[in-house]
Amino acid sequence: MSKPVLEGRVAVVTGAGQGIGKAIAERYAAEGAKVAVVDIDGVRAKEVADAITESGGTAIGVACDVSDRAAVDAAAAEVVAELGTITVLVSNAGVTRPAMLWKMTDDQWDAVMSTHLNGSLYWLQAVTPGMREARKGWIIFTTSAAGINGTIGQINYAVAKSGILAMMRSAARELAPSGIVVNAVAPAAATPMTETIRTDERFKDKYLESIPMGRWAEPQEIAGSYVFFASDDAAYVTGQTLSVDGGRVMMR
């Protein structure tokens, strides 16, 4: 019997209280990783972690506002103290503040940038010293088709997700000599953040028509790509973006 593909890894998954992040955390634990379920909602994070533990996995729930550097540093220290050196980071936390560009407020812009870009950078900086010392690590960012193609009504979100791609590629270049691989996944609309797209009569039919597979994704269908990028099978893969979107990105 083969051992679980992520056995021995300590993984942080941000935004793991629901949606894709929750599915990733659950799948990582099932594949043998010790998982820190990180979410701004500490109650939700603990609930996910407790469910993983009850199913036989190893997980802790950690409350953290990723846009707060001090909170990130404290959360990272808590994970190391409880689970050991962090070897996998999934930077997945995100928010949306939709508005057409001529209506976009500073608060809407800043909320998205601070969560997606600042939060990703803070966690990246928190985990890389340990990974560099160990000379191994797997970092996966969550981006979006919006960051590849642009979007309508969420210029802040599109810019943030495009910035994450630049961060990913730059980090991949800087960290490769230390044996750390850095990649990104661009998932389909399968999260509470995209509920409007999937349910609003103004958007859902047009969006669904743009997906060659003709259906919405489930979070569990997205999680497997994150397992691959955190596994030994991805040891020679870095600086890459995988679109898991039913073929939508090829329709641009």
Image (cartoon, grey):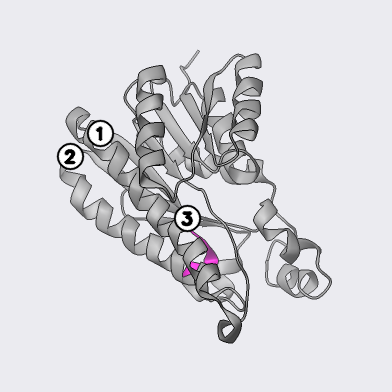
Q: Position of residue 220 (x, y in %)?
A: 65, 40
Q: Secondary structure at mark 3?
A: helix
Please indicate, yes or no, whether residue 234 appears anywhere in the rendered image: no
Judge the density around disc 1: few (<14), some (14-19), many (≥20) Cα neighbours within 10 Å. Answer: many
Rounded to the nearest angstrom, the CA distance separating label 2 from label 3 is 27 Å
Closer to the camera, 85 or 205?
85
Q: Position of residue 207 (x, y in %)?
A: 71, 71
Q: Secondary structure at mark 2?
A: helix
Would you say 1 lies left or right of 51 here?
Answer: left
Ranked by sequence position, the earlier of labels 2 and 3 is 3
Ranked by sequence position, the earlier of labels 2 and 1 is 1
Judge the density around disc 3: few (<14), some (14-19), many (≥20) Cα neighbours within 10 Å. Answer: many
Main SS, magenta region, reads helix
Q: Which residues make up the magenta segment?
A: 143-147
Which residue is disc 3 drawn over? 115
Q: Position of residue 250 (x, y in %)?
A: 55, 70
Amino acid type, callout 1: Met
145 drawn magenta: yes
Q: Residue at x 61, y 79 (%)?
A: 152
Q: Residue at x 74, y 64 (%)?
A: 196
Q: Residue at x 21, y 38 (%)?
A: 179
Rounded to the nearest angstrom, the CA distance separating label 2 from label 1 is 8 Å
Q: Quadrant of residue 219?
A: top right
Amino acid type, callout 2: Ser
Tell me, yes or no, whether the two marked residues, 2 and 1, touch with CB atoms within 8 Å. Answer: yes
Which residue is disc 1 drawn over? 131
